[in-house]
Amino acid sequence: MIQRWELDDRPAFLARLEALRAQGVSPERIRVRTPVPVHEAEALLRVRQSPLRYFTLAGACAGLLLGFAFPILTVRSWPLITGGKPLISVPAFIVVAFALTILLGALASFFGFLLLARLPSPARIREPEEHADAFVIEVSPEDAGGGTNGGDGARPPLAPNGGGHA
Amino acid sequence: MTRRPYLAVAGAVAALAAIGFSAPPGALLPALLFWVAVGQGAVALAAAGDLTRARWIAPLRGALLAVHPLLLVFPFAFLVFARGLSVYAWAQQPSGWLSPGFFVARNAALLLAVWFLALLYARSVAGDTPRRSFLAGLYALVFVFSQTIIAFDWVMSLEYPWVSTLFGGYFFVEALYAGVAVAALTAARQTRRGRGGDRAALLDAATLLFGFSLLWAGQFFAQYLVIWYGNLPHEVDFLLRRLGEAPLRRMATLVLAGLFFIPFVLLLSRSAKASPAVVAAMALVVLAGILAERLLFLIPVLALPAPAAALAFLALGAAFAGVWRGSA
């Protein structure tokens, strides 16, 4: 039988979670849903860091490179001296590189998120019930492993990032 | 309230008076420029936290506000510095805004007003009075005004007629950046001492330090790009004197590294932000960067008497340590 707590505030939620861990309940059996990110819970539940940041990094690096390559290659292909500046004027190109870094970083993050969140199929991430602003802790029975997630026993505990309301 | 902070203040005023009266003019300027930013910025960060109802700042607020007695040193130190206004070329041909009497009066009055508001604000926080938010807002307003006038009067007027309208904003953002560095140092110290629950404050202070490195770079670049692109002789001179050749060019590179590249790259990692040693080191790098930048502003236009300037810096540093360590 699944044990369940619905707590109103973050300190009570963290205190309960710490108590459960102190009792020796393994993180695999605990599942939480929170209305806001609670980083302390991630540490307590030993949640794996999302690989989303690598999408952002790759996108941002690609944007930075493209942002410098695009003006440098075009100015070399069509040399036109403007305002007496050197053809390859890094200060002016920083603006383009910065904008493209942000743009491609953001786009890569967005599509990476869609991919990691198993979209475009919302059914796979939809929560069956609504928890509003409650902090919810569920502990599955010892023999059931981590299988409280609609039969998807292989899935790790849900990251406490408000995913319940995604 | 103990007397210790005010003893530190009295000691600093006496030391600065001794240095100021015996050294050539301008000896106090670098130390004043740096510590005014640190002192006013630390209180301003606490006020900004109050205005935005920030909860993360609660464990650090006491240490930030404890710096407020230091602000009383600045009006006196400024008056000592103002004896030697001959360092400003405009003092030979005073005009309306840039005339010695008005210059001294407005700066001394503003520095005194900032200290007085910081005192009222710190007391209202201690007593949790209803005027707290109002005083936080008022302090923030006068802080911005004071830092702007410091930028325009103390630094920019050294190179009159060179002007940059962003210089004031640049200074008060940098002062807030210094305040964040003090908050990060405080959080690192508290975490080392093992006070529970402060690790979150360390993470938040480190994140803010990281964010301010970006904000600073944005402001720096906004000024640099316009001057570089316009390429007007009376504007470019300011940059050429500092970036034209070594050793100042190398110093400018260090400033850019200390205020942007090093904190930005190292604080990207979450584990670095959770490490008190890394966060404290980054805060010190940022403070060193601000000091180096203030020196970079002054060195090309002011014959700085190095030993006296260093002594003034240490005197104010000791006063800061006296008020800050007393509470953190």
Image (spheres, rainbow, N blue to C red):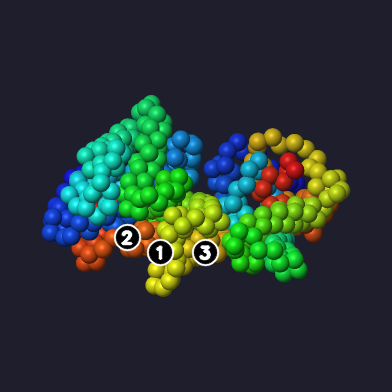
**Residue B245 percent across, percent down from the top left:** 43, 71
The quadrant where residue B319 appears: bottom left
Q: Earlier in the sequence, mark 1 or mark 3?
A: 1
Cβ atoms at labels 1 and 2 below 8 Å apart: yes
SS at badge 1: helix
Neighbours of disc 3 within 10 Å: few (<14), some (14-19), many (20+)? some
A43 or B294: nearer the eye?
B294
Spatial CA distance of label 1 from label 3 is 23 Å
Neighbours of disc 2 within 10 Å: few (<14), some (14-19), many (20+)? some
Report which residue position mark 2 lands on: B301
Tag nearer the camera, 2 or 3: 2
Report which residue position mark 1 lands on: B241
Q: Residue at x 37, y 27 (%)?
A: B131
Q: Residue at x 22, y 59 (%)?
A: B27
In the picture, which quadrant includes the N terminus of chain B? top left
Q: Amino acid at mark 3?
A: Phe
The chain identifier of the residue carrying mark 3 reads: B
Report which residue position mark 3 lands on: B261
Spatial CA distance of label 2 from label 3 is 27 Å
Spatial CA distance of label 1 from label 2 is 9 Å
